[in-house]
Each structure stands twice: as C-alpha cells, then as structure tokens.
Amino acid sequence: MIVSFPGDMLMRMLKMLILPLIVSSMITGLASLDANSSGRMGMYAVVYYFATTFMAIILGIILVVSIHPGTFTVIDREDNDLIGDSPVSSLDAFLDLIRNIFPNNIMQACFQHTKTVYKKKYLKMEDTNGTDINSTTTVPPVTTMINNIINNMTNQSEDATENFVWTRTYPAVNGINVLGLIVFCTVFGIMLSKMGERGKILVDFFAILNEIIMKMVLIVMWYSPVGIMFLIIGKILSLEDPAALGERLGMYMVTVLAGLIIHACIILPSIYFIITRKNPLRLFIGILQAWVTALGTASSSATLPVTFRCLEENLNIDRRVTRFVLPIGATINMDGTALYEAVAPIFIAQMNGIDLNFGQIITISLTATCASIGAAAIPSAGLVTMVMVLTSVGLPADDVSLILAVDWFLDRIRTSINVLGDSFGAGVVAHLCRHQLEQDPHAPIDDKSIELMETSDKKRQIKASS
C-alpha cells in the first residue's frame, strides 16, 4: 500500500483533469471550425478508428487460431467465483452504449453513467408451485409460520437457484460518462461556431479554461515519472508467485503480446505512412511520454492530458484536430482492447476443448468490436466487457477469472497501444484535412499556431520575392 501510494496520487491528479479537459478542449476545438470541416474531420476519424479496430480483431483471431495457446495451459479453477453468473448479454451492452450517448442529466454525466445490472428477484412459494403457503384456510397458523421461516431461509440460500428470476435494472454507477459528454460538447461547440461574434466571449472563456488546464498538466507531468515507477512496482509486489503465473499463462501472454506488437509496429505505422508519406518513427518519438504514461496508468482517459501536449508541442499538430479527435479516440478507438477481446474467448474455448465454428468466430469479432467501443477508458475495463463476448458464443463466463492474474500487465500494454492508435489517428486526420484547415475562415485559437502560420507566410513571401 505504501509503495503504491505515490502512483495512486498520480492517478488521482490525472483523473482530476479529465472532465475540465474534455469539456474545454472539445468546445474550443469545434468552435474554431465550421460545420463542414468538423463533419469531414469526424467522418475521417470514425472510419480510421473502425478500420484499425477491425484489423486488430482479425489479427488477434489469426494468431490465437494459429498458435493455439489453450492446449499448452493447465490451470486450477479455484477462483471461478470471482465473476458472477449474471446473464449479461451483448444487447444489454449495446443499449447501454446508446443510453450513455444521450444522458438524461448532463451534470450527472460528469460523474456517473448508466449500466445494466441484473438483480435476483426471489419468488414466493405460490409463484413456483402454484400453492400459497401463506393461506390460513387449509394450513394451521403454527405450520404457516414454520413454512414461512423455512421458505425465507431457502430463498437466501445459494442452492435455491430455482426460486428466483433475473430482473434488469438501470442504475447510475460511478464513473464519468465520457461518451455522453463528448456528444453534448460536440453539438454545443458546433452551435457555438455558428453564433459568430455573439459567441466570441464564450469561445474565449473555454479557450482560457483549456489553456489553464494544459498548464496544470505540465505541472503533473513533472511528477509523472515518479508516479509511474511506483505504480508498476506496487503491481509487481502484489503478485504472489510471478514465475508460476508466467509458466501457467505464458503462451496466452505471448499470443496477446505478439498481436499487440505487430499491430503497433507494423499495421499502424504502415497505415500512417501510406496515407501521409511521413516517417511514423518521428510521431512515435514525439508521443513517447504519453505512451509511457499509458503504460503506467493503464487508462486512456488519464493519459489524455499528456497526449494532447505531446501531439501539439512536440509534433505541431493543429489544436483544432487534437481537440476534436483525441477525446473521441480515447472513448471508441480501443485497438489493444479489441485484440484482447478477440483472443481471450477463443483461448478459453481451447482450454475447455470447445471447437468454435466460423459463425461463432464472426460473432466474436463483431461482439468484440462493440465491446471495445463500449469499454470504459479505465484500468481493466476489458474484463467487464469480456463477459459479454463469452456469453455471445455460449462460453462459460466464470472462466474470465482464469486470466485475471495477468490482466494487470496486459492491460497496460494494450492501453499504450490504444493511445498509440489515437495519436496515429490524429496525424492521419490532420493530414487529410490540412487543406480545409488552411482555408478555414476561423483563426487558430492558440499563439503557437499563429506563430507557425506567420512563419510559413514569411517563408512564402521570401520564396516569392527571390
């Protein structure tokens, strides 16, 4: 606990900045664009995100089917009760996604989101066998009391599974509803951009707020190396036997890591190079600090402030692009999570000796895509959505507990891949929209962009005069 404490402080600092950063950056970025530019930019971003996510899923399926790590694994099943038997379905996750897109209270969306939760509704004896034990017309009062006591004890027993039914509830659970805030801020920013001079004072307010938050991010980044170091040390110390763990789940870890490395080192850089004709290594070096932060925090949202600064300060990507693309990417672009969501169910099927047909594999790929989009940008969020993927093809959801022990490590790697994919996406969208951004009538919203434009104008003037 004491060793992890400095790392916990870093997580709290970064989470503290998420809400004001998303609100100010989205509104400021969209207010500086016209509707056509923002629509085109959004289309490019969504197409890129879905394409790379589906590529990650296909890669994961190919690797897990080829390597077949499940046959090498022998695991005891002593902790299978860690995951409940709640009948989670892909429909519930999809509908939760839609519900969170349109929150019924925007203030509540700042700290809570909607999630379908199943609760047990215990049935009376009259509901199960058609006889009312509470009837006093045929049963003496003393017997009725005894039967009631026995019935209550039976309903509370774990063995009385036939005496309850699952009922859906839709409570608000703790955690920022990032998707709902993004939708609200997107519409708000677009409407603000159409206000012209009347909305200038509000644009200035959010621009100043955003600048203040970025200065606070700079302060946190000085502390981040210390916090990241203690976060990782604390996680390693919490393992009981790392050697035995690696031996039991070694091939599974190798399969997931191989997929993540191929996706990060080959697929994403290739897409970036083909579209932009720029060196992808330069972009990776520019976002190295954000990549390391994601590795330590295991949260795309917590890394968002650092990603903003790396892309804008180190790579000079237009702030109007980063402000619009990165918050969306941190929510729906989960390449690493999607690959993991595709590998783990097939791995669990292999351990149970179940051969999945082509239709079931297609179901896994589609469900994993929806699950990765709906996964929260927080540590180990993929485990929650993994239950949905397993249920979609009839695999035992309890077996998720088998991979819990190594999830802390793989979660950090896949989160860093998620952040890398967001950054490459921002670079691709900035390149595709460069002509529209240059012709945009709205002036850039920061001094650095103005300075860069003035420098480029001077260069053009010198070249023209010469």
Image (tube, helix red, strand yellow):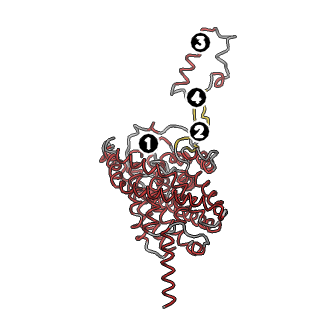
Of the residues shown, which amino acid type is indicated by label 1? Ser
Q: Marks 4 and 3: CB-CB under 8 Å? A: no
Number of the label disc, if any, that sits on residue 162: 4
Of the residues shown, which amino acid type is indicated by label 2? Pro
Label 1, secondary structure: give it: helix
**Mark pair 3, 2: CA separation:** 35 Å
**Residue under the point 63% across and 65% down:** 39
Q: Name the front one of labels 1 and 4.
A: 1
**Mark pair 1, 3: CA separation:** 42 Å
Q: Who comes first in sequence, dot 1 or dot 4?
A: 4
Number of the label disc, if any, that sits on residue 401: 1
Number of the label disc, if any, that sits on residue 27: none
**Mark pair 4, 2: CA separation:** 25 Å
Q: Who comes first in sequence, dot 3 or dot 2?
A: 3
Label 2, secondary structure: give it: loop
Q: Who comes first in sequence, dot 4 or dot 2?
A: 4
Q: Marks 1 and 4: CB-CB under 8 Å? A: no
**Mark pair 4, 3: CA separation:** 22 Å
Q: Name the front one of labels 4 and 3.
A: 3
Instruction: From the top left corner, tell me how far across and down residue 338 is, in percent.
Output: 50, 56
In the figure, residue 147 lies in which quadrant? top right
Q: Which residue is mark 3?
A: 145
